[in-house]
Every structure is written in C-alpha cells, then in structure tokens.
Image: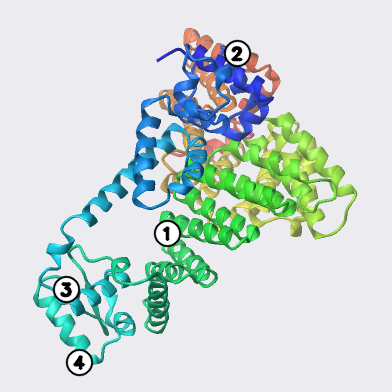
Amino acid sequence: MASIETFANNVKRLLAQRNIRIKDLAARIGLSESYLSLVLNGTRRNLNDEYKDRIASVLNVPMSLLYSENQPISSYDDPSPVFTDALRHELKDLIEVFLTKSNLRHRRNAFYIVLGTLSDRDAQSVKYFLSELLEEFARDDHGKVSDTMDLTEEEIRLLALISAAGNDAKAEWVRAVADLDNDAFASVTRSLRDKGVLSIVEDVGCTRFRVPNPYVPTSSLFSNSKLRQIYRSLARAMQLYPDDDPFFLRNLAETLVKAMEDKEAVIYFEKAARGFAEENLWEESARSWHTAAVLYGLLDNPRDKGRCLLEATRMSVSHNNLQAAIELAESASATFKAAGLVKHNEWACNQIGALFAAHDLEMAASWYKRGLQFSSLDSELYGPLLINLATVGLQRGKLGEAENALEEAKRWAERRSGPEVDRVMSHQSLLMGLIEYERRSWRKSQDYFLRCIERSEDLKPEDRATAWHNLGMIMYRHDDMAGARKYLTVAQEMHKSLGRTSTWVSGLVELARVALREGKSREAQQLTDEALLHIDEQANRERGWIWLIRGCIHRDAGRLSQAVELGRQAVDCFQREGAQRDLACAALWLSQVFRDMGNAQEEHLMERRAFQIYEKQHWDIRELHRECSLLSPTRSTSSRGDEVQ
C-alpha cells in the first residue's frame, strides 16, 4: 500500500477542491484539529485506521482512492470510480442480483447513490448482509415442493400462518387467523406434529408452536391485501394474549408493520426499546430505537425520528459501541438540521456531548462546540453548553480553553435571570475554583469554592462535595489543619451518602495526611488501613500516598530503612499514574530520608529528579518545598507519643 504521505496529499487535494476546512473534517471524524493538521502536514505519521475510514466516508470516496498514486484525485467527480476497487465491484454484482430477485431494479439509482456514501468497512458489512440474504433466497427456492409434498392444502396453509406468527407463537395467536373451528384446528396441528414439521410445547398457562424445518412462505399463498388482514388479526390476538418480555413487544411491533399499521407499531418499538434497556440489553435496545426512528421518518415526523436516533445513540454508548454511536449521533443531528429544528439540534448536541464525556473527551468537546454553533446568547441552553465545554476542557488539561468558556458563560448569565442562570453561575464558580486549584492559586481557588458553598442549593450533591473536599485541601496547604479536617469531614459524609467509593477513599487518604501533619500517626495509620480495604486496583495515586504517609510514620519513628522502601513504592505508584507533582514531592522527601541516612549519592539523585520535574514544567520550586514540608509533623513530641510500631 502507498505511504501515509500519499493518503495525506489526496485528502488535502479533496479538501481544497470541495472547499472543506480541516477544522470541519476534524469535527466530523471526532479528532482534534491540531492532530489532524499534523497528520496532513507530515509531522505525525500515525493515524488509526478507524479515523482513516471515517475520512473516506465523509469525503464520499473509497479508501483505495485515497491511497492511489496513479488515479488523479481531481477526476473523482462522477460516482462511477467508486467501483474501481475489487470490493465495490463485488458489491455491485450482489446488488444487481438482489435487485433482480426482489423486483426492485427500478430503484437501482437510489442503491448506488447510497453505496457511494459508504466507507469500506460499511461496504464490507453490506456485502456480507446481501450474501447471506441471497443464500436465504436460494434456500427458499430449493426443496419447497418436496418439503410439503405429503402435506394437505389445509396443513400447508396453517403451517404458513404459524410461521407468520413466529417461532414460539402462542396457539391463541394462530387460532385467531386460522379460520378453523377448535376441533379442526386441534386436528390439523396434531397432524403437522405427527408428520414432524411442527413442535407443540406446553408452556406455563399456554401452548406454543415451533416450526423446526423450512416452510412455505405466506406470500406464495395469500394476496397482499389478505396478508395485511392476517397480520392485523394476528397483532390483535397478540395484544389479547401478551407475553411479558421486550422480545414479544418487538415481535408485536414488527407484526403491526407488516399489517401497515406504522403509527401503532412505533409505539411498541419504543416500549420494546425501554424494556431491553431495563434488562441491560443495550444492543437490542439500540436496534429497536433505530427501527422506531426509521418508522418516524416514513411517517414524516423528524422530531421523533431524531429523538429515537438520540436514544439509539445512548444505548450504543452503554453497549460501548462508540463507532455505531457516532454514526447514530450524526444521523440525529442531521435529521434535526434538515427539518429546521434548531432548538432540538442544540439540545441533541448537548446530550450527545454528555454521552461521550465518559469515553472520549475530544469527541464530547466537539459536540458541545457544535451545539454552540446552533445556539445563541438568547438561548437557555447556551450557558449550560459553555459550562459543559469548560468541564471537558478542564478534564483535558485545556485550562485556557475552559476559562474562556467560563468567561463567556458569565457574560451570558449577566443578561438573564432565573434558576438555570443560578445553576450556571454556581458551576462557573466551581470550575473556576478547580482551574485556580490546578494552577496552585490557593487564595483565588478558596474564594471560588466558598461562593459555591454559599450557593450550594444550585449545585448537585456531588459538586457540593467536591467544593468541600477541595476547600479542605486548600486549608491543608495553608497549614490550617483544623479547617482542613472540618471541610474534609463534611465532604466525606457527602461522598459516603452518595455511594462515591473512589472519592470517599481519596478523602480517607487526605484525612490521613492531615493526621500526619498534626502528629497523630496512629490515626493516620488507621485511616490508610481503612483506605486499603476499599481502594480500587487502578487508584495508583491514592495508593502512592498511602505508602508515602506510612513512610513518613516510619521516618518519624527512626525506622529509615522501612521509610526508604515505602518511599520507593510511592514513587513507583506516582510514576505509573503520571502524577508529576506527587512524584516530585515523593522524590524530594525520599532524598531527605537518604540525607538522614548519610547516603549523599542517593540524596542528590532523588533531589535532582524532583527538581527536574518542576523545571521541565516551569512550576514554582517553592511550591515543591512547601508540599514536602507538610509531610513533617508540626509537633514531634506528640508524634513520638502516638508512635505506631
């Protein structure tokens, strides 16, 4: 295959020809503009195949063309080149056979227009689907007569009706459409069972039919109008004798579709989707929501179509199928946009951003930004979108971007009033507090968190707990251990009531640091013991602090060898977590222990390691010394008296 340079050059030429910005392409494929620019400019040479596939899909070209060094990219104006690669040729042949067998040749243009928009991965899936479908056609075309040679016309007719009702159909459903009295119905079903083409199963409170072998399709026995009547009667019988699972609801919905009762069918697809979600069958739920969306499209109801697509997106994210979620989300937004439903599109973008926030922060940010493009200062959702964008910006380490969004949110709030504005301003204070906390601007951060506590009724409980927790750690850094203990204890109660085990464990570790500073080594030991009972395996930062706190206890008791061993474990944990400030603090503390031991070589090595981290990040070295000093008890005599063996 040709090089990444060829791929990048072809993409750039297409973007130029179609007047598409790199920024817009990056947003469509869920990649940052800066990274995509580096790839297209040759600075970065690695790009995941999934993103390449998305680029081909957005540009409406096959992947082979993007890697082609021979075919001029400028010639790609006519859709015919889409069939120049082997995959598309094979798929074209399958489509032609399918169109012939299904009497849809008059619709072939529509098939090829859609085919031109497929990525290579999607084309491969369609190829597999059509191959399987044509094999099923072939099975239907062979052996049907011989399979039913020994059946009477009445038996063939009833067998077709049983098949229409579906496997595990209740006897009451079939009887409603069979046009037979009870005795005749029982006689024919027994005969089918005796001939081995039907299984009769006694279930709880009902009898069910199963057809283990190929059957005569109903379309060969009944006219279209008669079929619709059969499915309508079957649906009514199913409603009279229902099952209690979402698969039944979807089966009923599909039966109503066959009866041409789309308006009623879509209600049951939605009920089925909710039922699947309640049982954590996310993929089945997504499928049902998507089918409901298709029906709403046929019913010319774009609002509900977009809503169902959004629910399908939610279920796909729950199923961790992010690629499907991206495609569904794009369809939802496109549906609202095409219908001119600006407010719905704005709301959808906000919801989609929230869905992706736990999985892909870049993707979440791109959706919040898209929502802001649809929004305006007059919109009630403009402020919340900015707050959400700032939240993911903070999580991505983009403090400047987050702060800009918060300043814009503040300007939005100044023009409005009401509960939503109060909530935005409370979140604005919380996020600004976290930003200043990250910058080590303790006084500014403290002021913001105090504002949050004053307006705590506008915050979610978990956000209130965050404000209290961070205030506690600011007090710790002010060397106000009484204040630190007060705020951290309140936060701990909130974490526990909310069932937030990970943050509660983090609070135990922070309280242990307070107890250590106060000289209460026994309490510090007990708190770390309790934290270890509940700590997550991946919580390397908290585990590192546990080892460091215990190392401090051993150092204060004069057990320097044990202190060194625990200090090295802490350094290792912080290194794995990528917690650079904590790593520098542990390294500087460990250098001091080596100094106590008279090991000048190790002392200088660890000290240099600590300083290099701060120098590389251009952080204030005084902050490092301050952090390390807080690991020494304020009253050594009290520490000795509270010694832990």
Q: Residues within 10 Å of mark 4 (few under 14, many from 20)?
A: few
Are the residues flagged by discs 4 and 3 in contact, CB closer than 8 Å?
Answer: no
Give how far apart the Cα atoms at labels 1 and 3 are: 31 Å
Residue 432 seen in the current view: yes
| Disc on res. 41 | 2
* Camera-nearest label, 1 or 3: 3
Are the residues flagged by discs 1 and 3 in contact, CB closer than 8 Å?
Answer: no
Foreground pick, 171 / 500: 171
Residue type for callout 4: Asp
* Camera-nearest label, 2 or 4: 4
Quickly name the residue at label 3. Answer: 199
* Camera-nearest label, 3 or 2: 3
Q: Position of residue 152 (x, y in %)?
A: 15, 77
Residue type for callout 3: Ser
As helix, strand or loop, the secondary structure at mark 3 comes to strand
* Camera-nearest label, 4 or 3: 4
Q: Position of residue 56 (x, y in %)?
A: 51, 28
